[in-house]
């Protein structure tokens, strides 16, 4: 069974509400602190811009944990669990990310597929703090329209 | 003597060119890696939006090191050194930050004053990776027009 909403929570996907501090010169936005209960190690911080009408999918990591927030624009993130050992195997999860109503940090454990699409007419900026530095040998990709994931990005 | 350009480098201010990976769905932008030669510890990652015509200044930290980049929009950063023990005491430094030509990480040691202004008509997003989590007791502020710093933000 797949379900595309918050009530369906894939094992290993955690969503944390982030603080936003209003300021008339520009808001200040939390992302990740080393004293967060779930923090382990810092490997790398980087950004991924997502242009309007664009989809970046699918990817999964073998060892790297993702910590993703969207400080600019709006993103639709889809996650898919195909792990044999997981209680949520076969499930899809949708998370909308963007300020001010959905400014979250999404922590994604290794071995979970994810992808994201820009929502709206302006580019989005996705920020990611991962626990080990980028290593292309530890990630896998599938094409956007792969039949291995029961989700269609394009109607 | 003060000088407002790259040739004047305040002791403890380092500028690193960051990689940008072009992608027709949206570029990928480096920020900080734990295997960078100058990396010490991770304390916190956060964002500061700077609205058009806005200035956020002045601030200095007693123990925290800043790692600042600007993935969205354009910033004018001004730094000022009033440390008695520094060879560059009394100097000002200007750094322009923004993609694609000036996508840098600026590492600012503790005890150096800094501030920044939004350039252009669109909001800028400043990203900061600091080495210890935010603690209001370890920073000092001065008003934008403080006579203690020989720089005028507003003409």
Image (tube, coloured by chain):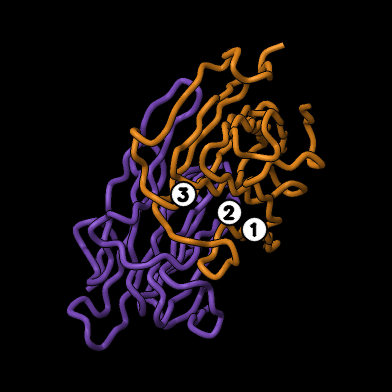
Chain colours: A purple, B orange
Q: CA distance from mark 2 to mark 1?
A: 5 Å
Q: CA distance from mark 2 to mark 3?
A: 22 Å
Q: Position of residue A21 (x, y in %)?
A: 36, 31
Disc 3 designates what residue? B130
| Letter of the chain that mark 1 sits on in the rendering | B
Spot the residue most to the right. B7
In the image, what residue occupies the spot 36% across and 47% down? B133
Disc 1 designates what residue? B27
| Letter of the chain that mark 2 sits on in the rendering | A
Badges 2 and 3: C-beta atoms under 8 Å apart? Answer: no
| Letter of the chain that mark 3 sits on in the rendering | B
Closest to the observer: A145 or B12?
Answer: B12
Mark number, residue A49: 2
| Neighbour tally class for label 2: few under 14, some 14-19, many 20 plus, Cα within 10 Å | many
Closest to the observer: A90 or B57?
Answer: B57
Establish if A19 lies above or below B17. above
In the image, what residue occupies the spot 32% across and 82% down? A82
Query: Which element type, helix, strand or loop, lies under badge 3?
Result: strand
Badges 2 and 1: C-beta atoms under 8 Å apart? Answer: yes
Q: Position of residue B97 (x, y in %)?
A: 68, 41
- Give the quarter of the figure containing the N terminus of chain A: bottom left
């Amino acid at each position: 069974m797949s379900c595309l909403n918050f009530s369906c929570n894939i094992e290993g996907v955690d969503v944390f509400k982030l603080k936003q501090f209003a300021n008339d010169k520009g808001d200040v936005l939390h992302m990740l602190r080393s004293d967060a209960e779930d923090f382990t190690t810092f490997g790398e911080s980087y950004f991924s811009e997502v242009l309007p009408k664009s989809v970046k999918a699918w990817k999964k990591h073998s060892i790297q944990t993702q910590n993703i927030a969207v400080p600019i624009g709006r993103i639709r993130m889809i996650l898919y669990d195909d792990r044999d050992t997981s209680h949520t195997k076969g499930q899809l999860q949708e998370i909308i990310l963007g300020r001010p109503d959905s400014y979250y940090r999404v922590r994604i454990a290794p071995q979970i597929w994810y992808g994201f699409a820009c929502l709206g007419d302006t580019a989005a900026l996705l920020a990611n703090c991962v626990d080990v530095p980028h290593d292309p040998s530890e990630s896998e990709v599938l094409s956007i329209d792969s039949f291995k994931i029961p989700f269609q990005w394009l109607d």
